[in-house]
Image (spheres, grey):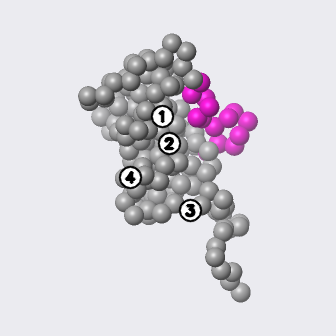
Amino acid sequence: MLCQVSPWVREVVHDVARYLRTSDGKAARLMGVTASHDVPTLNTLAPYFWRDYERGNTMWIGQNKPDDIRELMPHPSERVERLKLRVTRDDWWEFDAIAFAFAKPLAPVVGVLITQCARRERLLDIAAPGFVPRSPYSLKRGTVQWVGETRR
């Protein structure tokens, strides 16, 4: 599956993958699954549901006029990066049920779930226990990083 995420989310996925000593695709899958199983995250996404979604003993009712999920996706004018991941059959069915509730294609919905996990430290701690995310104000790739001391 190929989904598009913002560069910042891609860097968080890469950092989680380095922390877990695994590939970026496996880390992205883990983050997406973590977000899809988290009830508070699904409560946050519920106003965007167009159809009903049921998971276990919890059900979210679809909206007659749902909010536009494109608010949660990278804007077409923004730079996006592709993220390739493989999912198991059970994960695919879970993602597909959520995508059906959104009435959107599967890949953008998985990108939204990965983004939701990257934004919430609680979910990151579930996906990668002990992981400490970098500040969103730091830049990777050899440019400025907000560090307490300078090297001479």
> Residue 142, relative to residue 2: is it above or below?
below
Answer yes or no: do the residues labelled 2 and 1 have beta carbons within 8 Å? yes
Mark 3 or mark 2, which has the lower sequence index? 2
Direction from residue 9 to residue 42 in the image, left or right = left
The residue tagged with tag 2: helix, strand or loop? helix
Mark 1 or mark 3, which has the lower sequence index? 1
> Residue 15, relative to residue 1: is it above or below?
below
Residue 134 is marked as 3
The residue tagged with tag 1: helix, strand or loop? helix
Task: Give the residues in magenta.
Answer: 68-81
Name the residue located 45 percent from the left edge and 58 percent from the top edge.
Answer: 17
Answer yes or no: do the residues labelled 3 and 2 have beta carbons within 8 Å? no
Would you name the residue on which mark 1 appears?
A: 44
Q: Residue furthest left?
A: 57
The residue tagged with tag 4: helix, strand or loop? helix
Mark 2 or mark 4, which has the lower sequence index? 2
* Dot 1 amino acid type: Thr
Inter-mark Cα distance, 2 to 4: 12 Å
The residue tagged with tag 3: helix, strand or loop? loop
* Dot 2 amino acid type: Gln
Answer yes or no: do the residues labelled 4 and 3 have beta carbons within 8 Å? no
Q: Is residue 55 visible?
A: yes
Quadrant containing the C terminus in the rendered view: bottom right
Q: Is residue 23 visible?
A: no
Would you name the residue on which mark 4 appears?
A: 127
Q: Position of residue 139 (x, y in %)?
A: 66, 61
Mark 1 or mark 4, which has the lower sequence index? 1
Which of discs 1 and 4 lies nearer the camera? The answer is: 1
Would you name the residue on which mark 2 appears?
A: 116
Name the residue located 53 percent from the left edge and 54 percent from the top edge.
Answer: 12
> Residue 135, relative to residue 67: is it above or below?
below
Answer yes or no: do the residues labelled 1 and 3 have beta carbons within 8 Å? no
